[in-house]
Amino acid sequence: MKKVFSYILTFFVVLSLVTVVSVTQAADSMTGTWRVNVQDPPDPRAAILTFILQQEGEQIVGTLHGPYGEKKVKGKIQGTDFELKYFSVINITYKGKVESNKISGTVDFENVGLRSFKGEKQ
């Protein structure tokens, strides 16, 4: 009887852990609308952008809405680290971390340099 109780208790502990991990992963999903603020961008019009993203597994696709219209975005996420890329006259790459409804990191404007960014899910 003691063994059965031990197995049942173990089952519920594992089930609880799986539920917590699932909820945490869902909270850190890149799917959604993100408002991003780029610090000191090469073009001041590109300081505030909106990403609309869809995450499936480790793959991210979506669109960027900014001063130069709509751009296709592709990327990936591993754990909390993500990378997003698009082309707008030059190649632009965002690398950062996602924590719940916030993102931050650096953006590489090809041949212009790195800038920092912060964003929040809307």
Image: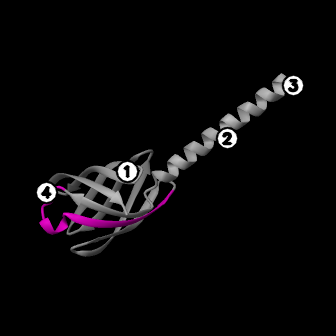
- Is 90 displayed left or right of 97 in the figure? left
Provide residue 91's location: percent of width, then percent of height.
Answer: 24, 62
Q: Name which quarter of the figure residue 45 lies in.
A: bottom left
The answer to whether the residue labelled 2 contacts the one labelled 4, judged by CB atoms less than 8 Å apart, is no
Image: 64 above or below 118 = below
Q: Name which quarter of the figure residue 43 lies in.
A: bottom left
The answer to whether the residue labelled 2 contacts the one labelled 3, judged by CB atoms less than 8 Å apart, is no
Instruction: Identify which residue, 26 or 2, lies in the foreground.
Output: 2
Residue plotted at (77% across, 30% down) = 7
Reading the chain from its start, which is encountered first: label 3 or label 4?
3
List the residue tagged with mark 4: 40
Instruction: Identify which residue, 5 or 42, lies in the foreground.
Output: 5
Res 1 label: 3
Provide residue 10's location: percent of width, then percent of height.
Answer: 71, 31
Q: Distance between the residues labelled 1 and 3?
A: 49 Å
Q: How far apart are marks 2 and 4 (CA)?
A: 47 Å
Res 6 label: none
Reading the chain from its start, which is encountered first: label 2 or label 3?
3
| Amino acid carrying mark 2 in the image | Leu
List the residue tagged with mark 1: 82
